[in-house]
Image: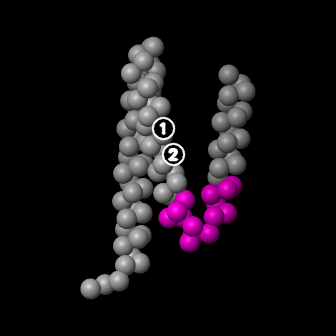
Amino acid sequence: MVASITIFVLAVFVGFEIITKVPPTLHTPLMSGSNAISGISIVGALLATALQAHWFASLLGLLAIVLATVNVVGGYMVTHRMLAMFQQKR
């Protein structure tokens, strides 16, 4: 348990440091990539929920499905809006 918490804290720290160093011009492609990762998270959460090994695992799987879906939909909406800014006006 301690090793898992240590890895999680280090991943959060490294992720924060990497994201803060990304220039603003790369945020839209980075968001598109994170949408793909969230799509994979949805598949994993569906599997965790479907196995019904324990009620708490099913609850966490449902929460993961909801949060990852919100992330994917919101990310695609922002990406679509950013790409619309570069289209020629008619």
Magenta stretch encompasses residue 72? no
Q: Quadrant of residue 22?
A: bottom right
Q: Residues within 10 Å of mark 1 (few under 14, many from 20)?
A: some
**Type of residue at label 2?**
Ile
Image coords of residue 15 (percent x, y) = 65, 50
Image coords of residue 75 (percent x, y) = 42, 56
Of helix, strand and loop, which mostly describes the magenta segment?
helix
Q: How many marks?
A: 2
The residue nearer to you, when weighing 50 against 64, is: 50
Question: Which secondary structure, mark 2?
Answer: helix
Q: Residues within 10 Å of mark 2 (few under 14, many from 20)?
A: few
Quadrant housing the N terminus: top right
Q: CA distance from mark 1 to mark 2?
A: 6 Å
In the rendered structure, the answer to whether residue 17 lies left or right of residue 32 reads right
Quadrant housing the C terminus: bottom left
Residue 74 shows which numbered tag? none
Q: Is residue 88 above or below residue 26?
A: below
Callout 1–callout 2 Cβ contact below 8 Å: yes
Q: Quadrant of residue 56?
A: top left
The residue depicted at 69 percent of the width and 47 percent of the height is 13
Image coords of residue 12 (percent x, y) = 64, 44
Q: Is residue 23 above or below residue 40?
A: below
The residue depicted at 67 percent of the width and 56 percent of the height is 18
Residue 37 shows which numbered tag? 2
Residue 41 shows which numbered tag? 1
Question: Which secondary structure, mark 1?
Answer: helix
Q: Is residue 53 above or below residue 30?
A: above
Q: Which residues are magenta?
A: 17-30
Q: Residue furthest left?
A: 90
The residue depicted at 55 percent of the width and 59 percent of the height is 30
Q: Residue furthest bottom?
A: 90
**Type of residue at label 1?**
Ser
